[in-house]
């Protein structure tokens, strides 16, 4: 039995079946490259759902991890730690917001944003308790906690998990009229992904973000951007909202905030909004821990100093142009921004992902019919050309 197979059998024996991974066991990785348990090499075109924007084991992040691990790893928020302030300062500068609240995962940050918006509606907008409404979009993905699935439009995410969290209204993505119609005096917020990720890399109609923000302002409704997957250069702007010059009231961040090394997430907003939390109203034992903060500080520095955003924009334009040239009647559309690209097929994408894997390219299907291409933003031109060669080989008719 191969080493890969032995590990998969052990994993399958005890593990809950809440994922359907491709049959590869990643045992080592560097940059865009990963190696399986039997020593075969692959290029990573998924980047852990955009958490690995820096590539695997970026040397500066690993150094920051080691340095901090030699000092202190966890304090809890019962005490201050010497990394948290610097982390806050960097996130505040990059988002232009006055306050930051750290958590660990994307879904937790989403929960945090929802709590903040509801409490803001209660405290500031004087919406009665239990009456706050939040508007979200069809085909959204904001995580897997009970509240995050409660606001999903995908019934498969919800079946059998009720009772669900009330207080959400779903409108079609990109529909300004539906947004206007959904707003009531009790509306606390409109929460959306500026480019939908799990829905299959869906870019909203030009001007949608800007006009939606205006509508929200007009009605005193918070505009919350879930940039968990789209943030940190992934789409060719630092945040995907920057494509339309939009400054949301609240940013939700995760994934690449920890450089693919540590789990860390955060919410950023001005004091009027995040100031609604008082001691004891929200928290997390590991949120803002010094190890994750030290790595995140390095991750943010690398993003800015190496200008991974411009790299993503330029290489992404090239990648999309080349992918669009592939001729095959099963390809319905190639779309995306920066190195955040979806290739939608008229057929199920899974067999193609399996074929690409045999060719040494790791991709994952999303929404059944779409292959997502989201390599590390550190990928070189040569590596991208090599990846393209493999895609052409499998996807050309
Ligand atoms: N929001 C968005 C937009 C996401 O894409 C994801 C994860 N795919 C999440 C939230 C949830 O993040 P996590 O898996 O870290 O909880």
Image (cartoon, rainbow, N blue to C red):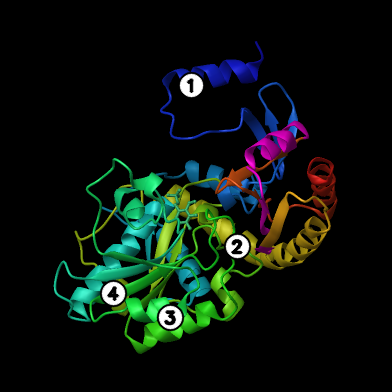
Residue 362's x, y, as percent?
68, 39
Residue 294's x, y, as percent?
50, 53
Mark 1 burial class by Cα count in 10 Å: few <14, some 14-19, many 20+:
few
Alpha carbon of mark 2 to alpha carbon of mark 1: how far? 39 Å
Residue at 29% x, 40% y is 160
Is the C-beta separation of discs 3 and 4 under 8 Å? no
Q: Nearer the viewer, mark 3 or mark 1?
A: 3
Sequence order check: which comes first, mark 2 or mark 3? 3
Alpha carbon of mark 3 to alpha carbon of mark 1: how far? 47 Å
Mark 2 burial class by Cα count in 10 Å: few <14, some 14-19, many 20+:
some
Sequence order check: which comes first, mark 4 or mark 2? 4
Q: Which disc is residue 12 wearing?
A: 1
Say if the magenta span includes residue 145.
Answer: no
Per the image, the residue denoted by label 2 is: 301
Q: Nearer the viewer, mark 4 or mark 2?
A: 4
Per the image, the residue denoted by label 4 is: 188
Label 3 beta carbon within 8 A of ligand 1? no
Q: Nearer the viewer, mark 2 or mark 3?
A: 3
Alpha carbon of mark 4 to alpha carbon of mark 2: how far? 34 Å
The N terminus lies in which quarter of the figure? top right
Residue at 41% x, 52% y is 154
Say if the magenta span includes residue 357.
Answer: yes
**Residue 378 occupies quadrant:** bottom right
Sequence order check: which comes first, mark 1 or mark 4? 1
Alpha carbon of mark 3 to alpha carbon of mark 4: how far? 18 Å
Q: Nearer the viewer, mark 3 or mark 4?
A: 3
Residue 111's x, y, as percent?
32, 58
Per the image, the residue denoted by label 3 is: 177
Sequence order check: which comes first, mark 3 or mark 4? 3
């Amino acid at each position: 039995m191969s080493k890969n197979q032995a590990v998969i059998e052990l994993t399958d024996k005890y593990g809950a079946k809440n994922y359907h991974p491709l049959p590869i066991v990643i045992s080592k990785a560097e940059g865009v490259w990963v190696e399986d348990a039997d020593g075969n090499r692959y290029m990573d075109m998924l980047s852990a759902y955009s958490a690995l924007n820096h590539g695997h084991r970026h040397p500066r992040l690993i150094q920051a991890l080691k340095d901090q691990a030699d000092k202190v790893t966890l304090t809890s928020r019962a005490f201050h730690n010497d990394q948290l302030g610097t982390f806050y300062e960097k996130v505040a500068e990059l988002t232009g917001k006055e306050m930051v609240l750290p958590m660990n995962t994307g879904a937790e940050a989403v929960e945090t944003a929802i709590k903040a918006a509801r409490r803001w509606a209660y405290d500031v907008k004087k919406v009665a308790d239990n009456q706050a409404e939040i508007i979200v979009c069809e085909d959204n993905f904001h995580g897997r906690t009970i509240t995050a699935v409660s606001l999903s439009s995908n019934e498969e995410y919800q079946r059998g998990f009720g009772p669900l969290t009330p207080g959400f209204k779903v409108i079609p993505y990109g529909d300004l009229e539906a947004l206007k119609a959904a707003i009531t005096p009790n509306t606390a917020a409109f929460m959306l992904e500026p480019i939908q990720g799990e829905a299959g890399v869906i870019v909203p109609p030009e001007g949608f973000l800007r006009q939606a923000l205006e509508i929200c302002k007009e009605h005193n409704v918070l505009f919350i951007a879930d940039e968990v997957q789209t943030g940190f250069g992934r789409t060719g702007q630092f945040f995907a909202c920057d494509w339309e010059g939009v400054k949301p009231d609240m940013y939700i961040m995760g994934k690449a905030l920890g450089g693919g090394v540590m789990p860390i997430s955060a919410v950023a907003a001005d004091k009027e909004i995040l100031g609604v939390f008082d001691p004891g109203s929200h928290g997390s034992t590991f949120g803002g821990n010094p190890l994750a903060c030290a790595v995140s500080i390095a991750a943010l520095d690398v993003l800015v100093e190496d200008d991974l955003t411009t790299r993503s924009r330029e290489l992404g334009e090239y990648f999309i142009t080349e992918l669009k040239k592939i001729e095959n009647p099963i390809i319905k559309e190639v779309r995306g921004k920066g190195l955040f690209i979806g290739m939608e097929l008229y057929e199920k994408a899974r067999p193609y992902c399996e074929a690409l894997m045999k060719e040494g390219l790791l991709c994952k299907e999303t929404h059944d019919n779409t292959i997502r291409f989201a390599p590390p933003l550190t990928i070189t031109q040569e590596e991208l050309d090599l990846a393209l060669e493999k895609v052409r080989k499998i996807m050309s008719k």
